[in-house]
Amino acid sequence: MIAIMKKNKLVLNIRSVLLNDWDPVGIGDNPNLSDEYDGYIGSIINILKQKPTIEEIVGFLGEIEKTELGINNVDVKYLCNVATKLQKIGETIIADR
């Protein structure tokens, strides 16, 4: 039960960063689209388990923006802030092992 609660919290924390900090397609506060980036959460969790560098997380997010979302002008500085938040969430994964 506790493991499920921790996983749910982890998913919600990552979702929050993706919606509130990353949000490359501008979903904003639209509650009907709150699950728009959920398809990336599993991959992000797997990456975070590997204790990635900020640059590795930035590369992953940038690749999503380019190849899946069609965004040509990826803002690496902006992605560094998002990656830092995700990396901190990843530290909780490592701590819970």
Image (tube, helix red, strand yellow):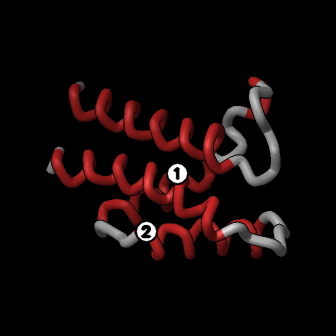
Quadrant showing the N terminus:
top left
What is the spatial separation of the Cα atoms under label 2 and label 1, in whole angstroms?
Answer: 17 Å
Residue type at mark 2 is: Ile
**Residue 76 in the image: above or below residue 12:** below
For the point 66% across and 74% down, the residue is: 63
Q: Is residue 23 left or right of residue 44?
A: right
Near-viewer residue (31 or 58)? 58
| Secondary element at image label 1 | helix
Q: Is residue 81 left or right of residue 93?
A: right
Residue type at mark 1 is: Ile
Residue 31 location, x and y as percent? 75, 24
Residue 41's disc is: 1
For the point 29% across and 67% down, the residue is: 51
Q: Would you identify the image quadrant in which residue 73 lies? A: bottom right
Q: Would you identify the image quadrant in which residue 65 lies? A: bottom right
Residue 16's disc is: none
Near-viewer residue (8 or 69)? 69
Residue 96 location, x and y as percent? 17, 45
Dot 2 or dot 1: first in sequence order is 1
Asked whether disc 2 touches disc 1, contact meaning CB atoms under 8 Å apart, the reply is no
For the point 15% across and 51% down, the residue is: 97
| Secondary element at image label 2 | helix
Q: Is residue 52 left or right of residue 59?
A: left
Counting the numbered discs, the total is 2
| Residue at mark 2 | 54
Mark 1 neighbour class, 10 Å CA radius: few under 14, some 14 to 19, many 20 or more? some
Residue pushed farthest front? 77
Mark 2 neighbour class, 10 Å CA radius: few under 14, some 14 to 19, many 20 or more? some
Residue 66 location, x and y as percent? 76, 73
Q: Nearer the viewer, mark 2 or mark 1?
A: 2
For the point 54% across and 54% down, the residue is: 82
